[in-house]
Amino acid sequence: MVNLHNVGTFNADTRFNASYLNELERMLEKVLPHAILKAKPNLNSRIRTLKRDWAIVYDILSGKDNSDFGSDEHRQFVVVKDAVWNSYISLRIIHKEANQFRHHRFPYYDQLTIIYDKDRATGKYAQITTILLKK
């Protein structure tokens, strides 16, 4: 995926182009000739899962109030004190999905950040609109 990103098959505005799954299938066939991985559903499903997991870890490490979180790049773990982790998980329902990364590695974080980082909304340019109602 990173190779496809680097040659311009992917960009943050348009995401991967329509033929990227087929190209990825051909690339994997060369490396894993007997795996029989098909673009759909195998690769498409795995890419969705990787992006979802990356977004969870990204939100943990880059969240507005998450300065206590860090990463161990060598072991590829999220690092934080237990009390902070438990507080984070208990705050909102959406943080429950993050629980899987407390004691499990996420080895693709850096590579996926290259691909998806610019695809994330940060709120930096958010604006509030006011709607005026006529009486």
Image (spheres, rainbow, N blue to C red):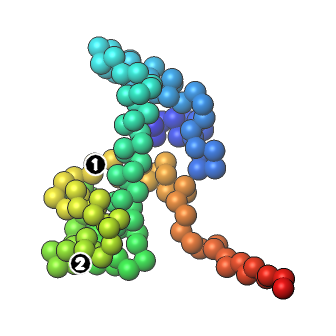
Say which element carries label 1.
loop
Name the disc covering residue 87, or none.
2
Q: Residue furthest right?
A: 134
Residue in front for this viewpoint, 103 or 1: 103
**Quarter containing the N terminus:** top left
Relative to 68, is 41 above or below? Answer: above
The residue pinned by badge 1 equals 107
Can see residue 27? no
Quadrant in the rendering for residue 72? bottom left
The 10 Å Cα crowd at callout 2, few under 14, some 14 to 19, many 20 or more, is: few
Relative to 35, is 117 above or below? Answer: below
Q: In the image, what residue type sits under mark 1? A: Pro
Q: In the image, what residue type sits under mark 2? A: Ser
Name the disc covering residue 32, or none.
none
Residue drawn at x 39%, y 35% as measured from the top left: 45
Can see residue 3? yes
Report the side of 122 relative to 125 (left or right).
Answer: left
- First in residue order: circle 1 vs circle 2: 2
The 10 Å Cα crowd at callout 1, few under 14, some 14 to 19, many 20 or more, is: some
Relative to 78, is 2 above or below? Answer: above
The x, y position of residue 131, in whole percent, is 75, 79
Report the side of 75 relative to 118 (left or right).
Answer: left
Residue drawn at x 39%, y 51% as measured from the top left: 52
Q: Disc 1 and disc 2: Cα gap in Å?
A: 25 Å
**Quarter containing the C terminus:** bottom right
* Between marks 1 and 2 in the image, the one whose residue lies nearer the viewer: 2
The x, y position of residue 71, in whole percent, is 27, 64
Quadrant in the rendering for residue 66? bottom left
Residue drawn at x 39%, y 65% as measured from the top left: 59
